[in-house]
Amino acid sequence: MSEGEFSNTEVIEHIALRLRRGDDISDIAGSVCHKAIEMKSQDNISCMIVALNAPSAAPEEHRLGFTPGCTQNLGSNCYKSAYTEMASRANLTLEEAIDKRYEHVKVELQKETLSKELLDDMRDELTKFGNKVPGEPGSTERLEYFKEWVESAQPQGSTDDMEFSLLRMLQQGNIGTAASLIHAAQTRGSSSAEDDSGDKSDARE
């Protein structure tokens, strides 16, 4: 059931069109979430597409869909931790996830369906990767480049940075990454509180 200005009928038409085009089903599900945000959906957004006539066993490469989120805030330690955790769930290192994001952004920028805001954000993100990303996708040379790129990212970490990061991720449909970031922040907050409590106990002794 949809809300905002993206009606159930329009959701079905959107999916049917992409299926007829032969697009990957995980990509279609992601596009539904992006479209819902563009159509002013304000609620939590998720999409599950059940292909009733699909083979009983999907090919291995289609069992886990993974689209890395925006890399613009990797200067924040909390964001980087969440991003690394997200990548590990897809059996990728941080550098491998960034490599996939770089390739994903290049592909997305060729599409004519992006909103102006998302288009501008992706162009800015691509620029920040640098003009000369070396090597082929997945190559040792490229992964080493992205490792150094992350290490050189400007430190961030204020509350304002965190809130801005969450807002941008939600606007771009990166719901899973936003949830991971919130969880990482809560976990770190709990650890700090426990440490503080321990310090006070030691002082009393």
Image (spheres, rainbow, N blue to C red):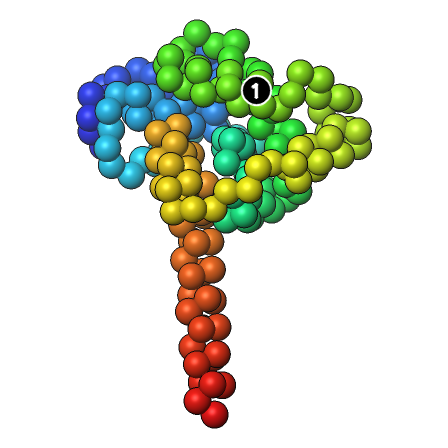
123 relative to 179, above or below:
above
Percent of width and height locating residue 17: 38, 12
**Residue drawn at x 47%, y 60% as measured from the top left:** 188
x%, y% of residue 76? 52, 43
In the picture, measured across the screen, residue 7 lies left or right of residue 119, that is left
Residue 104 lies in quadrant:
top right
Q: Is residue 91 left or right of residue 161?
A: right
Q: Is residue 147 shown left or right of residue 180?
A: right
Report x, y in % for residue 83. 54, 42
Q: Residue at x 44, y 15 (%)?
A: 119
Q: Secondary structure at mark 1?
A: helix
Q: Farthest residue in the bottom direction?
A: 205
Residue at far right of view: 140
Residue in front for this viewpoint, 94 or 154? 154
Q: Is residue 56 visible?
A: no
x, y percent for residue 165: 41, 37
Q: Assign the N terminus to one quadrant of the image.
A: top left
Which residue in the structure is indicated by mark 1?
126
Question: Which of the pair 88/95 is nearer the observer?
Answer: 95
- Please report the residue visible at 43 percent of the width from the left and 54 percent of the height from the top: 185
Q: Amino acid at mark 1?
A: Leu
